[in-house]
Amino acid sequence: MNRLDDEILEERLRTTLHRVAASPTPARQRRPRPLLAIALIVVATTGFVAWNALGPGEIDRIPTEQAVSSGIADDGTQWWLIPTSAAIKSCDGRMPGVVFVSAELNRPGQEWNMGGVAYGEPQTSNFACTPPDQANWLNDPTRSSFGHQRLGANNDPGSDIGVYGTVHPSIRTITVTSDVSQPLDVQTVTLPDDPDGPRYAAFTLPNDASRFTLALVAADGSTIATEIVTVGV
Amino acid sequence: MEAETDDPPGIDDVFRVHRDRLVGLARLLTGSRECAEDVVQDTFAAAHARWDTIEDPAGYLTRAVVNRCRDRYRRRLRWQQLPWRRQEVTRLPEIDETWRHLNRLPEPQRQVIVLRYYGDLSFEEIADALERPSSTVRSEHRRALDRLKRYLA
């Protein structure tokens, strides 16, 4: 292209930008984040009324019997991964995904303090009450959403780190490597009411982990995607 | 006598109409669809609490998304160790070539080009969104076009 006049260049820029903006997500490394945590804040500010008997946002009891995964971190903190609809009696019990509950942060009588994830693309700004659209994600096994949080109060840097996420139904294992711990294979689980649907996982890392890698592994052992996470970012 | 129906649009209506455009805009400004989705999600979450006070939702959201993308850019400068991609996205040679060269532009020029040719904003609207003088925006636009012509020649 020897000479390019403004008009042709401008048209080329318009075409390029619109095509790139609309293009699908390539195989990638990305920084996970807590998805539902923001949704919970939105719900709280819109005046939901049906959290539980103790009042808005206060913990009556943690429904640990409904946990799909649980464990005790190296720092001794108990944690659970619970279907959101079991933990939060809002939106007619139809809240999507899971929440990660640290016992240290969630004591009866206090307000809930948890992060969560849901599989798919949000459909409304108040997406806590609206199931995300899973269609695009189900067509792309690399899609996932992860969040992480300190298990202790006030983001205590001495407390361990809880990581939770949701992945494509084909992902059966998440291999975790960090800068301070041995590789860890975490099996993914489904929710009881959606046994063929998206899968979920949670695990903990030592308090001094600053960076970790998640390899999403399918049932045949192939690695579908790799995510690199920087703690606190 | 006709009834007045000037009720401002609800946030969910605005979300449905503008989300894809805003994600596209944020993607072009951040270079990442995941970051773009985060930015737009955060923008709507922040807007939710003060929705009743927002007079021009589309304009407000555009400015908010641009600002959050600029914040991400500044943060990226401080977190150089984070992975960052500049790669083929469409596998259409002319598109990917142009996109690569767009990403070689200095960030202020790239922002102007994205807002002008994806956002279809006037120079005054771009100046407002980027909080820069309109004359500066015009000169950055001119420099960006000249630079792209050299790259693509």
Image: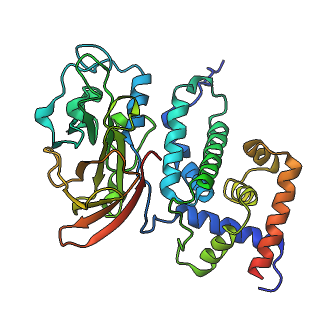
- Residue at the far bottom: name it: A2
State the image coordinates of residue A99 (x, y, percent, origin top left). Answer: 27, 38
Residue at horizontal 32%, vertical 38%?
A: A159
Between A9 and B77, the one lying in front of the other is B77
Residue at horizontal 59%, vertical 27%?
A: B8
Between A206 and A5, the one lying in front of the other is A206
Does residue B10 appear in this view? Answer: no
Quarter of the N terminus of chain B within the rendering: top right
State the image coordinates of residue A47 (x, y, percent, origin top left). Answer: 40, 19
Quarter of the C terminus of chain B within the rendering: bottom right
State the image coordinates of residue A144 (x, y, percent, origin top left). Answer: 34, 56
State the image coordinates of residue A118 (x, y, percent, origin top left). Answer: 32, 45
Residue A66 sits in quarter: top left
**Residue A124 vertical position relative to residue A14 in the rendered view, above or below:** above
Between B20 and B104, the one lying in front of the other is B104
Asked if residue A179 lies left or right of residue A203, the reply is right
Residue B43 sits in quarter: top right
How many marks overall? 0
**Residue B52 vertical position relative to residue B140 in the rendered view, above or below:** above
Residue at horizontal 53%, vertical 71%?
A: B89
